[in-house]
Image (spheres, helix red, strand yellow):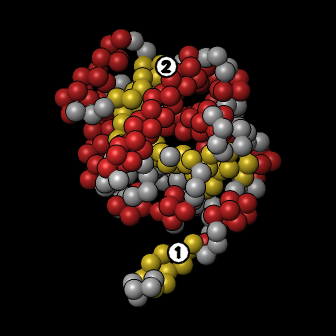
Amino acid sequence: MLEKLIEQTNQHTILDMEASIEHLTRGTIRHVDQLLVVTEPYYRSLETAGRTVPLAYELGIKQVHVVANKVRSPQDEEAIRRYCAERNFEIIGVLPYDNEVLEADQAGLPLLDRKPDSNYVKEVSKLMDRILGVHQNENENQKQTA
Amino acid sequence: MKIAISGKGGSGKTTLSATLARLLSRQGSSVLAIDGDPNPNLGVALGISALGLSGLQPLPRSIIEQRPDADGVNQTFLTQPMKTISSQYGVAAPDDITLLLTTRVDHAGKG
């Protein structure tokens, strides 16, 4: 079902997936342009990302990127960067640990409405610009090879 | 542009999905958000009201069917156009987003 929905829509699509992609088939995911793998700077979260990224490439997703989330310190960022560098994973964004995220969650309101100028929202905005850049490049490459 | 977001439970993938969907929609083209998590929270994260969320139903199996294509190979097809599916089962979220829910909540506690 998911495969057909993603194939048939002509809208920009954001798909919030299950934690694990291990049950996915090439078919389900073949119309997805990009997978973002969100990871926190601790071992088990990184290990999940470590399994997900190669699997995503095996499934045929062309753009697979890691997003570092809940980063509290330069050491946190370094831990994620080192883990990814050892495996040639590309990091597309580093999002800070932001108390505002938790507070908005507890209030049941989007952070974007509660604190639009929070660090988290600012960094997601930068992340979006980079994502748009990736897709622009991808489209240009396709035109050139066509 | 079709982006999937994965990550361990609690990694913040739903908050990221929602924030990204709304910022992307503000760029000028409406966004389709699909909640494929068995523990669906994307609606709240997008800012849909409790009333709006009460109308959110998982997509029924009847929107797809298996039948042979022109070459006689069995394929999956949507039984209705995407527009109809969006307007019938989708719930509107802020910034001109439509949310669809693909998974059922009847496995509560699982995962």
Distance CA(mark 2)–CA(mark 1): 43 Å
Amino acid carrying label 2: it is Tyr
Q: Secondary structure at mark 2?
A: loop
Q: The residue marked by circle 1 belongs to what chain?
A: B
Residue B2 image position (x, y, % from top left): 49, 48
Please, which residue is most extreme toward the bottom here? Answer: B72
The residue that label 1 is drawn on is B77
- Write the residue at 44% across / 85% down: B70
Callout 2 touching callout 1 (CB < 8 Å) = no
Residue A34 appears anywhere in the view: no
- Write the residue at 76% across / 56% down: B55
Residue B17 appears anywhere in the view: yes
Residue A61 image position (x, y, % from top left): 34, 50
Please, which residue is most extreme toward the left here? Answer: A86
Amino acid carrying label 1: it is Phe
Please, which residue is most extreme toward the top here? Answer: A74
Q: Are marks 2 and 1 on the same chain?
A: no
- Write the residue at 67% across / 20% down: A115
Q: Given this view, does label 2 or label 1 mark the residue nearer the observer?
A: 1
Judging depth in this view, the residue of B39 and A61 nearest the camera is A61
Please say if A44 is above or below B30.
above
Q: The residue marked by circle 2 belongs to what chain?
A: A
- Write the residue at 56% across / 16% down: A119
Q: Which quarter of the figure has residue A46?
A: top left
Residue A132 image position (x, y, % from top left): 48, 34
Q: Is residue A47 left or right of residue B7?
A: left
Judging depth in this view, the residue of A81 and A12 nearest the camera is A12
Residue B79 image position (x, y, % from top left): 61, 75
Q: Secondary structure at mark 1?
A: strand
Label 2, residues with CA under 10 Å away: few <14, some 14-19, many ≥20: some
The residue that label 2 is drawn on is A97
Q: Kindly identify which numbered label has been placed on residue B66.
A: none
